[in-house]
Each structure stands twice: as structure tokens, then as C-alpha cells.
Image (cartoon, rainbow, N blue to C red):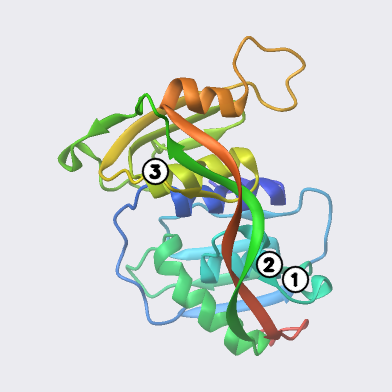
């Protein structure tokens, strides 16, 4: 079943998948068996992306920025720098993996990198810049996170199974996640980078419920208050260093086949 999402939701999904606790990774293929990429005919809500776990990647109306996010796992969606016109151009991607090989976002990464280099003549380099974000620290009264044993953490999911780690406006749930992963999930709600300065080690369960910013009225606490009261952590504004991907060159019209 194809997941059809508007582009901001797809971006949030990718950030979450990168932040959530690591799952089993299929052995990566060396290259796509076949791949075709073409400029899209853009229509409202045209963007769609397939779920992991199959031997095909058929994406529709995906921006070059999103393809780069899949390929390079940036720390934050806005950390890709280059021509906005090129980055906001849309493409359809139809690719297949060798028989018996399935993909998730980890195993897809090197394949997508190769595809972009070959078909778009992509060249790039890495840099850093500071952006406004947050840091999380432990509260003076201690944390309220629930520690769990690594042995109790489920290490993989079959295609189509629901994950125990998810983000929705007003609710974040995590099972068996470390402090860096927790910070990554909080960044989805904050919509800016959140870095881990807790010093915590180990794995934790977390349930966070808060009033979304667009809620007209709610009995739930604000996002920072909920983090303090429910997790025993403090959310503090900070300048956050972000690793950037600087696009030196990319063709706007790719080699199609």
C-alpha cells in the first residue's frame, strides 16, 4: 500500500525515521537493478513515497531536496544549501533492487547517492553553520524517563507493521530510544534542531503529551512545560551547530534512464 502524504509530512517522516531507535538493516545492494527518473507534472498533493520493505522504490513528485535528504541523512531538513529553484524541482523515480533485496532508509542511502551522482552529475561538499534551536538538559530534580534493558527492545519490524516510536501533533511516543534519538524526536515537534546535552546513557521509554501550537484550547501543558513535568528535562533556546550539505553543481534535467 502506497503512503500518500503532502511534502511537509514526508519530510517529518524522514526526520523521525532517522531519529528513532535503529532497526535491523537489510544488506545494502551495490546499485539499483534498474532506475528511471523524470521531471514531474506537479499537481496538488501529488507527492507520494512507498513504504520500506519492498524491492521497488517508486516515488512520485518528490523534490530534489527530499531525494538529497534520503541520500545523505542531513541533521535537519534545512541544512541542504544550493539553488532553491533546483532543490524545489520535482521528479518521479522508478527504481528496482536486485531479486531478494528489500530496502529501508539506511540501505537506500548509498543507492540514492549513486543515482544522484550519475543522473544529475551531483557534486557537493560538507560544511557547518549555527542555527537557532534548543538543547535538552536534565532537570535538577532528576529525569522521569523510564529506563529499559537493551534486551527488551524490539530490533526490527516486518514491512507494514506499526512502529512503537511515533510523532503526532500533541503526542510523542518512544520505546527503547537513547537520548540522542529522543532529542531528534523532540525536534519534530519544535520544528527546529534539538541537541542532547543531558549526559544520559542507556535506553528509555517515553510518552509525551502536550498542547499543539494550533490548539484553540487544551487542558494539556505547553510543549516546554510538558517536557519538564513529564520527562524531567529542560528545553532551553540555544545556537545549534548543524552539519550542512552544500550543492556545488546539480543538473536540473537528469539523465532519464
Q: Residues within 10 Å of mark 1 (few under 14, many from 20)?
A: some
Q: Residue at x 66, y 78 (%)?
A: 246
Q: In this orientation, which residue lies closer to the viewer: 22 or 189? A: 189
Q: Would you name the residue on which mark 3 appears? A: 198
Q: Is residue 27 left or right of residue 246?
A: left
Q: Residue at x 42, y 30 (%)?
A: 139
Q: Residue at x 77, y 16 (%)?
A: 216
Q: In terms of secondary structure, where does tag 3 sit? A: loop
One can see residue 214 in this view: yes
Q: Residues within 10 Å of mark 3 (few under 14, many from 20)?
A: some
One can see residue 92 in this view: no
Farthest top residue in view = 219
Q: Would you name the residue on which mark 1 appears? A: 87
Q: In the rendering, which numbered label is found on residue 65?
A: 2
Q: Position of residue 132 (x, y in %)?
A: 67, 52
Residue 100, placed above or below residue 82: above
Amino acid at each position: 500500500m502506497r503512503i500518500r502524504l503532502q511534502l511537509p509530512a514526508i519530510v517529518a517522516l524522514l526526520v523521525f525515521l532517522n531519529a528513532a531507535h535503529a532497526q535491523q538493516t537489510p544488506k545494502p545492494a551495490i546499485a539499483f537493478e534498474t532506475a528511471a527518473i523524470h521531471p514531474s507534472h506537479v499537481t496538488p498533493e501529488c507527492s507520494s513515497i512507498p513504504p520500506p520493505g519492498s524491492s521497488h522504490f517508486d516515488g512520485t513528485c518528490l523534490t530534489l531536496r527530499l531525494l538529497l535528504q534520503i541520500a545523505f541523512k542531513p541533521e535537519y531538513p534545512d541544512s541542504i544549501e544550493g539553488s532553491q529553484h533546483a532543490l524545489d524541482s520535482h521528479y518521479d523515480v522508478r527504481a528496482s533492487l536486485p531479486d531478494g533485496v528489500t530496502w529501508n532508509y539506511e540501505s537506500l542511502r548509498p543507492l540514492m547517492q549513486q543515482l544522484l551522482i550519475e543522473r544529475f552529475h551531483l557534486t557537493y561538499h560538507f560544511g557547518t553553520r549555527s542555527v537557532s534551536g534548543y538543547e535538552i538538559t536534565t532537570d535538577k530534580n532528576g529525569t522521569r524517563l523510564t529506563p529499559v534493558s537493551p534486551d527488551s527492545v524490539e530490533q526490527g519490524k516486518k514491512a507494514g507493521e506499526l512502529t512503537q516510536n511515533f510523532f503526532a501533533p500533541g503526542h510523542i511516543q518512544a520505546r527503547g530510544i537513547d537520548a540522542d534519538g529522543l532529542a531528534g524526536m523532540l525536534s519534530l515537534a519544535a520544528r527546529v534542531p534539538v541537541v542532547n546535552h543531558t549526559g544520559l546513557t542507556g535506553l528509555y521509554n517515553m510518552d509525551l503529551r502536550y498542547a499543539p501550537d494550533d490548539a484553540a484550547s487544551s487542558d494539556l501543558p505547553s510543549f516546554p512545560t510538558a517536557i519538564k513535568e513529564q520527562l524531567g528535562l529542560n528545553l532551553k533556546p540555544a545556537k545549534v551547530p548543524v552539519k550542512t550539505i552544500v550543492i556545488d553543481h546539480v543538473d536540473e534535467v537528469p539523465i532519464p534512464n
